[in-house]
Amino acid sequence: MSKTLIAPSMLASDFGNLQRDTEMVNKSEADWFHIDIMDGVFVPNISYGMPVLQAITKHATKTIDVHLMIIDPDRYIKDFANLGADILTVHYEACTHLHRTIQAIKAEGMKAGVALNPHTSVELLKDVINDIDLVLIMSVNPGFGGQSFIENTYNKVKRLKEIITENNAETLIEVDGGVTDKNAAELAHAGADALVAGSFVFKSDDQLKTIKNLKQVANS
Ligand code: DX5
Ligand code: ZN
């Protein structure tokens, strides 16, 4: 089994010290930078946009994992490719022509991800599972950091893992929202390949140590 990856969510970082926090992630045992883009329409919050992403990518030395919580993501696919996104994840609920969107992301040289809200069934991805590189399972309702983890996520991860195996797909499973050292091991055992952690990392006193411990727990 390959190692479970850790993706700190920069939404919880200190924007006044963005370079410092980006360099902390560079130095840490984390694997990806998780970047949450919210438009105030698809979700009831506005996070940050292109200039802030650019400020992060200027210093980041690890994979840039962009999670778009926006309507009509097709309009911005090229922009995110130009800004250095490695993985671009769109929401199932925001895409009428999901297959076309996935192809457009891949045509720009990025890995394509699809995110599912807590109420959206993993069964809905069966017909595109071989076309996508990653499924992001939301374990909170998207829009805000610091919410508590929804327990049904374990079932969704397990069922999605079965679907991936049945289809001989290589799709990664990422879990996002309310991840801590209390649920990381069970998520990894259920089949999660990557865990996003915002508040748990950035609100801790020793962020490097928290990332190291979370990675250890996830791989135990
Ligand atoms: C929520 C975002 C998450 C969020 C996670 O809509 O997609 O990535 O930043 O934050 P925590 O880990 O605090 O739940
Ligand atoms: Zn996210």
Image (cartoon, helix red, strand yellow):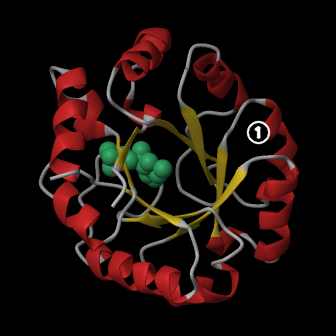
Query: Toward the viewer: 46 or 15?
Result: 15
Which of the 4 image quadrants contains residue 112? bottom right
Image quadrant in which the N terminus is located: bottom left
Q: How many numbered dots are placed on residues in this image?
A: 1
Q: What is the residue that sits farthest to the front in this orientation?
A: 1
Q: Name which quarter of the figure residue 160 lies in.
A: bottom left
In the foreground, 128 or 116: 128
| Residue 69 drawn at (x, y percent) | 61, 55
Residue 121 visible in the snapshot: no
The residue located at (69%, 38%) in the rendering is 85
Is 60 located above or below residue 85 in the figure?
above
Name the residue rendered at 18%, 42% in the picture. 216
Residue marked by disc 1: 80
Does ligand 2 reach within 8 Å of label 1's beta carbon?
Answer: no
- SS under mark 1: helix
Left or right, residue 172 beside residue 217: right
Q: Amino acid at mark 1?
A: Phe
Q: Give the percent coordinates (x, y) of residue 170.
A: 56, 68
Q: On the picture, is 210 further left or further right than 169? A: left
Residue at position x 67%, y 41% in the image: 86
Q: Is residue 50 above or below residue 188?
A: above
Q: Position of residue 97 (x, y in %)?
A: 82, 76
Q: Position of residue 21 (x, y in %)?
A: 40, 17
Left or right: 127 as drawn, with respect to 44:
right
Q: Is residue 96 visible?
A: yes
Task: Judge the density around disc 1: few (<14), some (14-19), many (≥20) Cα neighbours within 10 Å.
Answer: some
